Amino acid sequence: MDTTTHDRAQAGTPARLGLRAKVLAVGLSGVAVAGVVGGITVSTLGGIEATNQEVSRLQALATQVREVKYYNADVSGWQTAYAWEARKAGPKEAVKDTNPNRKGYLDDAVALRKVLADMPTGTMTDAERKKFAEVVALWDDFFRADD
């Protein structure tokens, strides 16, 4: 008998219990590690979901902002066209709703107002809502000046 086995036998602990304890300890360690890894995975997936929602929110806002940028150019382009028409055909003719340039401007003005009204402000941060309100106010000023 070696001294380790002899010491265990004298302490009242059979040698087989030492092996079982080691196997059990390894198994419990594996379960604990699996639990930690599972917890980290669940936590990470929650973070990924939150990030995906934020990206979706920003993509929706970016789409709307691109539309506003489009109308920034288009509305002012039509306005410039009918302003030049005033020089060529006269002011009264230029602002008639039947004038193609004025009609293009009016159609785009209606479309832009719809885009602004449909903007998903509920998903904006407070700072974004404030900036958007400034943009809407500037467009309102622009349309009043044109009228």
Image: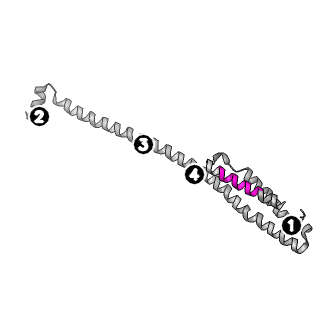
Mark in the foreground, 3 or 2: 3
Q: Amino acid at mark 2?
A: Thr
Mark in the foreground, 1 or 2: 1
Which residue carries the number 4 mark?
55
Image: 112 above or below 21: below
Name the residue furthest bottom. Answer: 88
Quadrant housing the C terminus? bottom right
- SS of the residue under disc 2: helix
Quadrant housing the N terminus? top left
Query: Is the Cβ of the residue at disc 2 closer than 8 Å to that at disc 4?
Result: no
Look at the image and say whether residue 133 sits in the magenta stretch. Answer: yes
Choose between 43 and 5: the one closer to the eye: 43
Q: Amino acid at mark 4?
A: Val
Residue at 13% across, 29% down: 8
Badge number at residue 40: 3
Marks 1 and 2, the one that precedes in the sequence = 2
Choose between 15 and 34: the one closer to the eye: 34
Mark in the foreground, 3 or 1: 1
Which residue carries the number 2 mark?
4
Marks 3 and 2, the one that precedes in the sequence = 2
Q: CA distance from mark 1 to mark 2?
A: 103 Å
Q: CA distance from mark 3 to mark 2?
A: 41 Å
Marks 4 and 3, the one that precedes in the sequence = 3
Q: Which residues are magenta?
A: 129-140
Badge number at residue 100: 1
Q: CA distance from mark 4 to mark 3?
A: 22 Å
Q: Main secondary structure of the magenta part?
A: helix
Marks 3 and 1, the one that precedes in the sequence = 3
Q: Amino acid at mark 1?
A: Pro
Marks 2 and 4, the one that precedes in the sequence = 2
